[in-house]
Amino acid sequence: MAEYKEAFQQKRIRNCTCSTPLECAEFMERYIEIIFNPNATVSPIGETKEKFNKLAQQCCGRREFNRFVTAKRVNNMNVCETVYLQLLANFATILHLCNEDDDIDSAKILMILSFTFHTNGKYLYEDLRSHEIWKSMRFWNAAFLHAVHTERKLRIPSDKNFSEQTMEQRQEHEEVHKNIFFGQLTSFLTNMKALELPSSMINEFRERTLVFQDLDEEQCRILADLTTGKDSSYTYPKTADLSPKSLDVIKSFGKSVVHSISKTFS
């Protein structure tokens, strides 16, 4: 166990670019413990907050923050109001820095996590709707392509070059890629609607993205349905309105999202 922990620490250090990588990881681990402790508070002008702000300005600091918050989601998705407000303040700070530094990967993870943590039925994304980063088409384009690429690496073996693959393998990989593309686009469009972005922006994102992949007629219909309706009254599609095939694809995608987030921080 000790050897495993040491190896894990060394991996985190290699991924850190600040001058004190181990200190960065250990601080963020302690900081997240404080945030999730309803009896503890972080002073906005204290040394702890000052150090957090300093580390959050670096990509590795944001990654460590995301790593430990992600680990907490297993048993702490429904949090008390005190923890919720702490998460909200820190998410807003890091999203602002992500927007300034063009840190798409960290912002994408925070977006997913904002749909995870909630209190009294209210999710973090509801209080983050006005954040500037969601208004950036560059964020959505880059985050989507990164998400597709990450899941493709996880689900499609890369032990053979394209020229070495049989026709059957190529067709199988293409079908997996198509479903990955459809699943990620479904998720992104759903999130954009939940964040109450303008319909014109959501439709533009959908139409531009579909240029990169030929989808089935049923898949295109589902995506079109997701982008219709009033900006302020979006509801998730009812399962009764979807075909069994569509439901299977969406359920499969839901499982892959959880797996993808976990693998990102392993």
Image: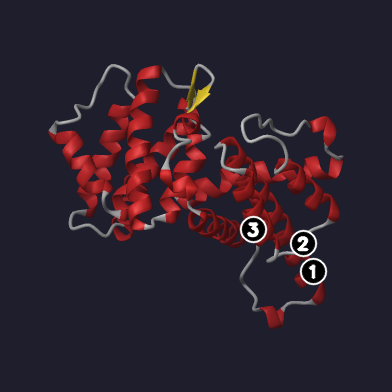
| Residue 46 visible in the current orientation | yes
> Whole-Å distance between the Cαs marked 1 and 2?
6 Å
> Whole-Å distance between the Cαs marked 3 and 1?
14 Å
Circle nearer the N terminus (3, 1): 3
Circle nearer the N terminus (2, 3): 3
Reply above or below: 45 against 203. above
Name the residue that disc number 2 marks: 175
Name the residue that disc number 3 marks: 155
**Closest to the observer, 183 or 9:** 183
| Residue 5 visible in the current orientation | no
Q: Which mark is residue 171?
A: 1
Mark 1: few/some/many CA within 10 Å (<14, 14-19, 20+): few
For image coordinates 73% across by 77% down, the residue present is 165
> Whole-Å distance between the Cαs marked 2 and 3?
12 Å
| 239 relative to 32 in the view: left or right | right
Q: Given contact means CB atoms under 8 Å apart, are the residues at marks 3 and 1 in contact? A: no
The image quadrant that residue 157 belongs to is bottom right
Say what amino acid the circle numbered 3 marks: Arg
Say what amino acid the circle numbered 2 marks: Glu
